[in-house]
Every structure is written in structure tokens, then in C-alpha cells.
Image: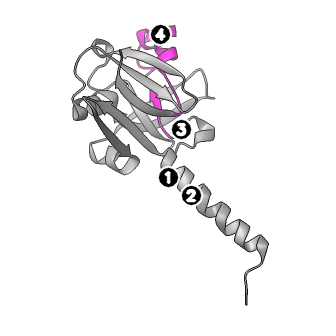
Amino acid sequence: MFPNATSLALTATLFLSANAASAASVLTVTHGGETHEFDIAALQQMGTIDVTTSTIWTEGVQHFTGIPLATVLNEVGITEGSVAATAINDYSVEIPLDEITEEYPVIAFHVDGQPISVRDKGPFWIIYPFDLAPEWRSEVNFSRSIWQLTKLQPAD
């Protein structure tokens, strides 16, 4: 029996959707002429951290899981200056390394135990512990909380 056009179209759609989701779940970090790609599993192997906080973009308190931004930057050798973080839509923001602690901000990839979808600001979202102390709740940190993060590289 031959598959009909509808089942072929559905199979192709599912295949393309799975591949697009997989490709979207890669964080690309460029430094020193080298490109490093990290999927969620690779980031998890470096050690995760949890941040429970509210945000100005979500309702109530959320439980974020991710990896400290400093850990990823250290892994690829970005140790001074600023890092440019770029989103899927090419929005970009610079974060000075001297304003990054060993723990915060976090590159979150789960919220409330679930992967963050592109629709919900994922797959990667830079999160600060806004509820931990008043100094984290600033316009500067809000602007640096880039969602749909895809790329990191030293700022020019």
C-alpha cells in the first residue's frame, strides 16, 4: 500500500519540525577564531544551577534551571572585556565580564522543570536572580536578560 499525500506531508512536517527544534537548541560561542556549539546536554554536563525568581515578563515566581554564564565563558576562554549576547531575531546586548559573578546570570534552559520553548523565550534565556536582592532588579539587568539566545562572542 502506498502512503497518501497527506501522510507524506505530515511525515515531512514532523521531520522538519524536529530538526528545526534540534538546531534551535544549540548555543554557539565564538572566540579566538573557534566556534563552539553547546546543546542542552553539553551544558548540563558542566553543572547546573537553579534560580527561583519572578520576572517582569512572566506571572508569579518561576523555577529556572541553567548554567552560570561565567562557566560557559570560562570553558571557551573568554575572560576579559565584554560578551555580546545575540538572540534569534538578531537583538544583541553587551554584558561586561566584570559584572558577571561565578553564579549569575544564568543561561536558563528549563523553567519549572520543562525545556523552554522558542515560543516561551527559549531555548536559552539569560536570567538574573531578580528576587534575591534589589540591585538585581535594574533596567540594565532587565535589558541584559536576553531570551531566545543563540550566540555569544567577545564584544568588539
Q: Position of residue 60 (x, y in %)?
A: 60, 29
- The first of marks 4 and 3 along the sequence is 3
The residue to which callout 1 is attached is: 22
Residue 137 in the image: above or below residue 55: above
Percent position (x, y) of residue 4? 77, 78
Q: CB of mark 3 within 8 Å of CB of mark 2? A: no
The CA span between labels 4 and 3 is: 20 Å
Q: Label 3 vs label 1: CA separation?
A: 12 Å
The alpha-carbon separation of the residues under discs 4 and 1 comes to 31 Å
Q: Is residue 114 visible?
A: no
The kind of residue on which mark 4 rests is Val
Q: Earlier in the sequence, mark 4 or mark 1?
A: 1
Residue shown at 45% from the left, 28% from the top: 126
The residue type indicated by label 2 comes to: Ala
Give the position of the C terminus as an image quadrant: top left
Disc sitting over residue 18 in the figure: 2
Whether residues under marks 4 and 3 lie with C-beta atoms below 8 angstroms apart, the answer is: no
Residues at discs 4 and 2 in contact (Cβ within 8 Å): no
In this orientation, which residue lies closer to the viewer: 135 or 89? 89
Q: Earlier in the sequence, mark 3 or mark 1?
A: 1
Element type where label 3 sits in the image: loop
| Along the line of sight, the residue nearer the viewer: 47 or 15 | 15
User: Mark 1 touching mark 2, by CB under 8 A?
Assistant: yes
* Mark in front: 4 vs 2: 2
Q: Are marks 3 and 1 in contact (CB under 8 Å)?
A: no
- Measure how far apart labels 3 and 2 are at the Cα level: 15 Å
Percent of width and height locating residue 95: 38, 16
Q: Which residues are magenta?
A: 122-148
For the residue labelled by badge 4, is the local secondary structure a helix, a strand or a loop?
helix
Residue 73 vs residue 9: left or right? left
In primary-sequence order, the first of circles 4 and 2 is 2
